[in-house]
Amino acid sequence: MESVTRRDFVKNSVAAGAVVAAATTVTAAQAAAPADGTVKILAISCSPRQGKTTATALGVCLQAAREVGPRIETELIELAGLKINGSIAAGIPLAEGERDDFPTLVPKLADPKVRGIIIGTPVYFGNMSSLCRAFLERCIVLYQDKLALSNKVAGVVAVGGTRNGGQEVTIQSVQISLFCNEMILVGNGRPGPRHGATVWSGAEGGVLKDEIGMTTVKALGRRVAEVALRVANSER
Amino acid sequence: MESVTRRDFVKNSVAAGAVVAAATTVTAAQAAAPADGTVKILAISCSPRQGKTTATALGVCLQAAREVGPRIETELIELAGLKINGSIAAGIPLAEGERDDFPTLVPKLADPKVRGIIIGTPVYFGNMSSLCRAFLERCIVLYQDKLALSNKVAGVVAVGGTRNGGQEVTIQSVQISLFCNEMILVGNGRPGPRHGATVWSGAEGGVLKDEIGMTTVKALGRRVAEVALRVANSER
Amino acid sequence: MESVTRRDFVKNSVAAGAVVAAATTVTAAQAAAPADGTVKILAISCSPRQGKTTATALGVCLQAAREVGPRIETELIELAGLKINGSIAAGIPLAEGERDDFPTLVPKLADPKVRGIIIGTPVYFGNMSSLCRAFLERCIVLYQDKLALSNKVAGVVAVGGTRNGGQEVTIQSVQISLFCNEMILVGNGRPGPRHGATVWSGAEGGVLKDEIGMTTVKALGRRVAEVALRVANSER
Amino acid sequence: MESVTRRDFVKNSVAAGAVVAAATTVTAAQAAAPADGTVKILAISCSPRQGKTTATALGVCLQAAREVGPRIETELIELAGLKINGSIAAGIPLAEGERDDFPTLVPKLADPKVRGIIIGTPVYFGNMSSLCRAFLERCIVLYQDKLALSNKVAGVVAVGGTRNGGQEVTIQSVQISLFCNEMILVGNGRPGPRHGATVWSGAEGGVLKDEIGMTTVKALGRRVAEVALRVANSER
């Protein structure tokens, strides 16, 4: 069933030195069970632009997650400024002197306290940023380490410059990679449940004034937190 | 936020007599908590052809679900032969003497013991059957009854006549409706997790000989059962 | 390559009597070449509700198409009120006394003067109406008649009750069936080209007041007309 | 209608020095009309691995395109080894000494003789390569130059390591970006038309032994060539 290409994809990833080190860290982290009942929700901002609309939307999303209960802890990670080379996942080594920051993210993603991960991405030409795509590709390291993202709850926020600018398609495009990591997918919950949060950054006043979008963002944050709590509780 | 059209959609659905009766049943069913720890997984075969490839694939899927543990109970419902008129969901009344069978399904779907629902559909021209679409539309009755499908775990099986015949797109097209009902979505789990089970009915020997497809079908059955157990356990 | 299921799908469709008659009409219509240079654009409203938002949006779309040039002729067909039984495409015969209206549509769709077809559908739970799905399934009759829709230009309009309510996903779900008929797909053209027209019926004042949506609808009408003219001209 | 974010996206792209130079070339190239009737089809291999399955599949695709007629000329461009930084499209300048190869591609893409463009990508975790995504993002330069890709015919080839490994979703994810550039989209044509070519690289013997996949690849090559010829002829 496992195909040659996929096998190479995995094998080559392992071969890349920096990645192997990170993968080791994963296993170590998994061994340590969360003792205090903390449920952590990570948000990953996949915009190349730091502190802009995607990060802002994710901040609102995490705030709503925290309001679900005192056990919820959150962290926003911005990929802006990090070097994440997707091709490493396909076995292409880094060039001489090329920097790669993905390994620093691995322990954070694999942390067993992390029960929910929210991916936020700007929408360019109807789909996710290449930074988001590279990030997802590199998650092969977690995949190959006994599916380290398995059973974490996932949700997606898409921020587009036009009203119906590809947000919905982007959400589905990100979700399929999360399903490939055996994650548990939720959309934004009530009111008006949909498959993810859809923000319109071109609305007057910026994303925070996009009332409809912010409703979906908050509903997604709450939903990820609620289901993450359930999954955590199911193991007690 | 709630739009006029959506409001009409809901209101008109309620107005339809048969549906109101069914909805009442839902609420009653929800009041009764499952005492015995049984976790039920329903599979809905949305093929217009009874006992054919979609039903067969779902049978395998449910068998794999049952093997997850003794608490798992399953039921296969075939829509073939049932009259399910999608337009009722949009407020169009039945014609004089027209039959409609959806209300008989409502108590089964809303049953709180049902923790997982697997939708199986044949693929025609790259998308789900119109019977599947009508079924999903009519779930508005459950939506309007306090999101009666909320937190049930869902997975999708797509059976196509050609190898890459729209199975993947069909899965996504069904999933978006399930997200709209605040369900918890899973794909087929290991090995080779993906967003759902993809069957090729045109393979020699029929679907049961489609080894790759059957691997995804079993992996989906197990996955829905496992996550449904988790969600059930989280409430104990 | 052609699978058993697909073969049955086709064979069974042919078997249905009413359909055979219609298919014959197709071939006859194709023989007659358009002499006068007229390029006809059909719009199919797949809402179960007659004269409502989807039909209104398509009216605007066709108006924009006509403004492209004097050779453009348009017709709006509303499926509301018609009986279109999708299951016939899968070989399930009509019940005793059951009516089916699809055959009346076949000559209109197959007409060689028709160079463009615009599918409009309301969005329910993030996807097309079951009426739309049934319509697309029944196009198997045209498929089996030497791909009678081949090289016709196609575009999609999705009308949703919420702002990001599944319009985009619906467009893709319809498009895949059109690709299966070897059609030529276009989205809404400039300004702001996207993969189709996205209307928000919940905006205050109804769809005609949805300025952004109407911009996409007009841009789609123009685009279908322009490319349909090109395709027609290429044969002169 | 044009949103702030989109505006910035465009403006920032223009601001990047190397890009402005390339854009100028575009306009110059467009001025020169093709005199000899040549219709050129470009294939872009978006695999980070040179000469592997995606390039092989595209070779077969272009061969089929050439067989459509003597006016068809083809070229395969491999992105492997090129540096294409997607973030430039969002206005992030290159780091000191960082190389960027996209501008060298711009005149080739904008060449008015190029009537068809076939995008080929490997599938990783159910979606396109980040290299493919970065390439599509950078096409903003062509978008802003009077939609230089408008009316070029486009098709997509997806090469996945598992049988139903995301090829279909990948095709749709690429297509939406092509629609955003006002391109004319076709799928693989007869026999068995679908929305694009789907290759299974994990089949025994490699992609060339994937008979079903190769059938779709050839059908896509022919289809792009045929419709590209039509579009070219429509202007004579």
Image (spheres, coloured by chain):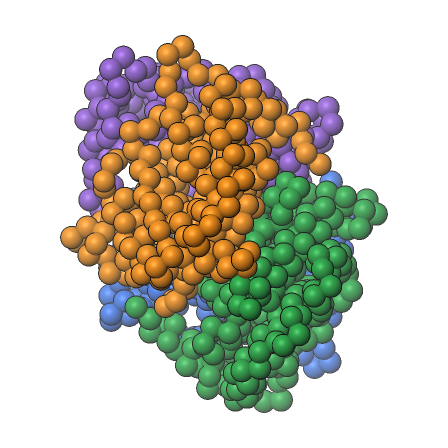
Chain colours: A purple, B blue, C green, D orange
Say which residue appears at 65% left-offset and 59% top-offset: C225
Q: Is residue A144 above or below residue A169?
A: above
Residue B188 appears at what percent x and percent y? Answer: 36, 48
> In the orientation shown, which residue stands out farthest toward the right?
C205
Q: Is residue D144 visible?
A: yes
Q: Is residue C156 left or right of residue C69?
A: left
Q: Residue at x 63, y 40 (%)?
A: C192
B11 or C70, which lies in front?
A: C70
In this view, A76 is above or below D31: above
- Please give left or right for residue B192 compared with residue C208 in the image: left
**Quarter containing the N terminus of chain D:** top right
The structure residue drawn at horizontal position 23% and vertical position 51%, both measured from the top left corner, is D207
Is there any visible trace of residue B143 in the rendered image?
Answer: no
Question: Based on the displayed image, in which of its 4 quarters is residue C65 positioned?
Answer: bottom right
Question: Which residue is the extreme one toward the front?
Answer: D35
Is D33 placed left or right of C161 in the picture?
left
Along the viewing direction, whichever of D233 and B9 lies nearer the viewer = D233
Q: Position of residue D179 (x, y in %)?
A: 54, 46
Q: Residue furthest top?
A: D96
Along the viewing direction, whichever of A100 and C67 lies nearer the viewer = C67
The C terminus of chain D lies in quadrant: bottom right
Residue B78 left/right relative to C75: left
Tell me what residue is drawn at x 67 percent, y 79 percent: B98
Residue D155 in percent (x, y) is at: 43, 51
Q: Identify the residue at the far left of this view.
A: D205
Residue C191: image quadrant is top right
